[in-house]
């Protein structure tokens, strides 16, 4: 007698896929549906579509620049700490002062609802920058 599990076609066939064909990598779009970019609304881009595309690229580049500046401000004191504590505190103060200026300028350009929070953050950054510079001055006076 043969084993029914081996000869049954139901067990040897692959289960039906629940992934839509357009999401499977390498699957071309259907012929009746024109391919269009994700940011484009119509198959033939309009001036508004190109403006949206340019805005998206500008926004992405600004985000990358902000991330790099943030990483530099955060990492600089730790790298400075490898050389000297005074250098690390000085870099911390410079980074906080830079953040104060940038946050204050952003507050002036932001929506009215966000303005008080951003200005408060800028003031706190400024206070911390002054504290860092005060600690640096005290350390320099001792030596």
Image (tube, rainbow, N blue to C red):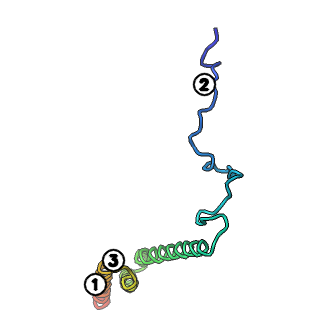
Provide the residue designation for mark 3.
Answer: 114
List x then y, in percent, for residue 35: 67, 59
Residue ID for mark 2: 11
- Camera-near label (3 vs 2) is 3
Few, some or many residues within 10 Å of mark 3 (<14, 14–19, 20+): few
Q: Which residue is under mark 1? A: 127
Closest to the observer, 141 or 95: 95
Q: Looking at the image, is 53 positioned above or below residue 31?
A: below
* Mark 1 or 2, closer to the camera: 2
As measured in the structure, the alpha-carbon distance from the residue carrying label 1 to the one carrying label 2 is: 71 Å
Which residue is at 60% across, 71% downward? 49
The alpha-carbon separation of the residues under discs 3 and 1 comes to: 20 Å
- In this rendered view, identify the residue nearer to me: 3 or 9: 9
> Which one is closest to the eye, mark 3 or mark 1?
3
Badge 1 crowding class, 10 Å Cα cut-off, few under 14, some 14 to 19, many 20 or more, is some
Tell me the quarter of the image containing the N terminus.
Answer: top right
Residue 30: x and y, percent? 69, 50
Quadrant location of residue 58? bottom right
Q: Nearer the viewer, residue 104 or 110?
A: 110
* Local secondary structure at mark 2: helix
Element marked by disc 3: loop
Residue extending farthest top: 1
Q: Residue at x 44, y 75 (%)?
A: 70
Give the SS element for disc 1.
Answer: helix
């Amino acid at each position: 007698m043969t084993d029914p599990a081996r000869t049954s076609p139901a067990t040897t066939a692959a289960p039906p896929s629940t992934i839509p064909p357009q999401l499977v990598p390498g699957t071309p779009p259907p012929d009746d549906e024109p391919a269009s970019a994700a940011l484009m609304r119509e198959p033939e881009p309009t001036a508004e579509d190109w403006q949206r595309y340019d805005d998206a690229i500008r926004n992405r580049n600004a985000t990358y620049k902000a991330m790099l500046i943030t990483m530099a401000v955060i990492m600089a004191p730790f790298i400075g700490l490898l050389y000297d504590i005074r250098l690390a505190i000085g870099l911390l103060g410079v980074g906080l002062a830079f953040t104060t200026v940038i946050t204050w300028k952003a507050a002036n350009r932001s929506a009215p609802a966000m303005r008080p929070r951003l200005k408060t953050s800028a003031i706190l950054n400024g206070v911390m920058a002054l504290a860092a510079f005060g600690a640096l001055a005290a350390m320099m006076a001792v030596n």
